[in-house]
Image: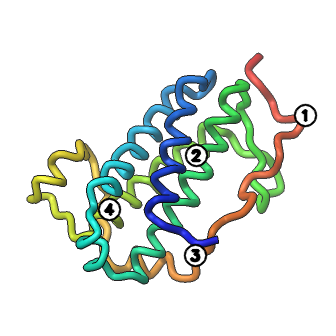
Amino acid sequence: MAVSIAICITLIEETTGLLTAVRSNRQLCQSVAVQLEILYNILKSVDSEEQQRANKHHLKLVLINLQNLASRSKIIFERSQSNRILIRVKNFAQAKSIQDELRDIKADLSIAVGLLCLVFSISRETPLYRSLGITEQTTVNESKLADLEGIQIEQDYYGPPADDEFTTD
């Protein structure tokens, strides 16, 4: 499956659209949605000329990372609609707290904001940066891009909901 800016934009729109139906973990879901909105605004504001100037390999790595994070956020938002408090991560032996997972995603999204700014050369001094409403940004450099080498689009990061996942009902 190919990754593109359009796919990431659509996935972010779908994810943030779920926020109104979230019943549990609402505050953390809202903070994740704010980070997703910033990423959405960056992707929507980048024109084709800026896309051409970006390092294609680095952009692809960042977009794969972003797609994975947006997909994970979407699943968490869906599970939070039914008041679930635990989620099964496929590679872990036991369920993980949805709140802990949301905190991890939020931190990773903050890094993704920095990576997109790095790939598209958006500095703190540019009008675009100031218009994005970025209040906090994790400082990133080329080494963070190196950490993404070998990243793949995650299929089924979370296991299916199980009957023994706790809910707040």
Pointer 4: what residue? 114
**Residue 54 falls in image quadrant:** bottom left
Pointer 1: what residue? 163
150 on left or right of 12 = right
Instruction: Name the residue rendered at 29%, 78% in the picture.
Output: 52
Q: Which mark is residue 151?
A: 3
Instruction: Name the residue rendered at 58%, 75% in the picture.
Output: 151
Q: Amino acid at mark 1?
A: Asp
The answer to the question of whether label 1 and label 2 lie on touching residues, with beta carbons closer than 8 A, is no
The answer to the question of whether label 4 and label 3 lie on touching residues, with beta carbons closer than 8 A, is no
Residue 26 drawn at (x, y percent): 54, 26
Asked if residue 148 is positioned above or below residue 104 in the image, the reply reads below
Instruction: Name the residue rendered at 60%, 26% in the picture.
Output: 22
Q: CA distance from mark 2 to mark 4?
A: 18 Å
**Residue 93 falls in image quadrant:** bottom right
Quadrant where the N terminus is found in the figure? bottom right
Q: Residues within 10 Å of mark 3 (few under 14, many from 20)?
A: few
Residue 19 drawn at (x, y percent): 53, 30
Q: Amino acid at mark 4?
A: Gly
Asked if residue 147 is positioned above or below residue 11 in the image, the reply reads below
Pointer 2: what residue? 73
Quadrant where the C terminus is found in the figure? top right
Q: How is the image coloured?
A: rainbow
Mark 3 vs mark 1: which is more N-terminal?
3
Q: CA distance from mark 4 to mark 1?
A: 38 Å
Mark 1 vs mark 2: which is more N-terminal?
2
The answer to the question of whether label 3 and label 1 lie on touching residues, with beta carbons closer than 8 A, is no
Q: Residues within 10 Å of mark 2 (few under 14, many from 20)?
A: many
Q: CA distance from mark 1 to mark 2?
A: 21 Å
